[in-house]
Image: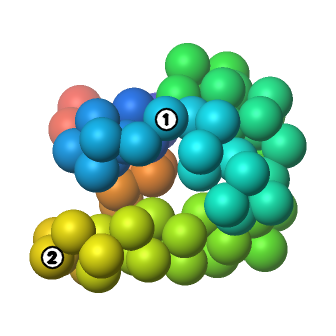
Amino acid sequence: MGSLQFNLKETLDQLKITRNKLAVESKTRPATILDLVSGDTKRLELSTIVAMLDTLNQFAKEKGYREFTFHDILEYIPDNNE
C-alpha cells in the first residue's frame, strides 16, 4: 500500500512564512495547517487546498519563486513492493 508524504513544512520554510501567516492569508483554520505540517490530516477539502495554493503562489510571485503545486503540500508515494 502506498503512503502520503506531507511537504507543507518544507514549502513554508522555502517561502520563509509561518504556519499562522498562511492560515490568516488563506483563511484556513490554523489547526488544519498544523495537521498538514505534522502529517496528522485525516480529511482535506479541495477548496482548502485551492486557497492554500493560491496564497502560497501569491507569496512565491512576490519573492520571484517558482509556482507551487499540489505536490508541494501533499504527495502520494507508491509502494514499490506491489
Question: In screen coordinates, is 1 left or right of 48?
Answer: left
**In the structure shown, which secondary structural element does the residue marked by tag 2 occupy?**
loop
Tell me which label, 1 or 2, sits earlier in the chain. Answer: 1
- At a point 69% along the width and 63% down the height, the residue shown is 26
Instruction: Classify 10 Å Cα crowding around label 2: few (below 14), some (14-19), many (20 and above).
Output: few
Instruction: Classify 10 Å Cα crowding around label 1: few (below 14), some (14-19), many (20 and above).
Output: few
Residue 61 vs 75, above or below: the answer is below
The residue that label 2 is drawn on is: 64
Q: Position of residue 50 (x, y in %)?
A: 64, 76
> CB of mark 1 within 8 Å of CB of mark 2?
no
Residue type at tag 2: Gly
Q: Is residue 10 visible?
A: no
Q: Nearer the viewer, residue 14 or 45?
A: 14
Q: How is the image coloured?
A: rainbow
Q: Nearer the viewer, residue 76 or 36?
A: 36
- Residue 18's label in the rendered image is 1
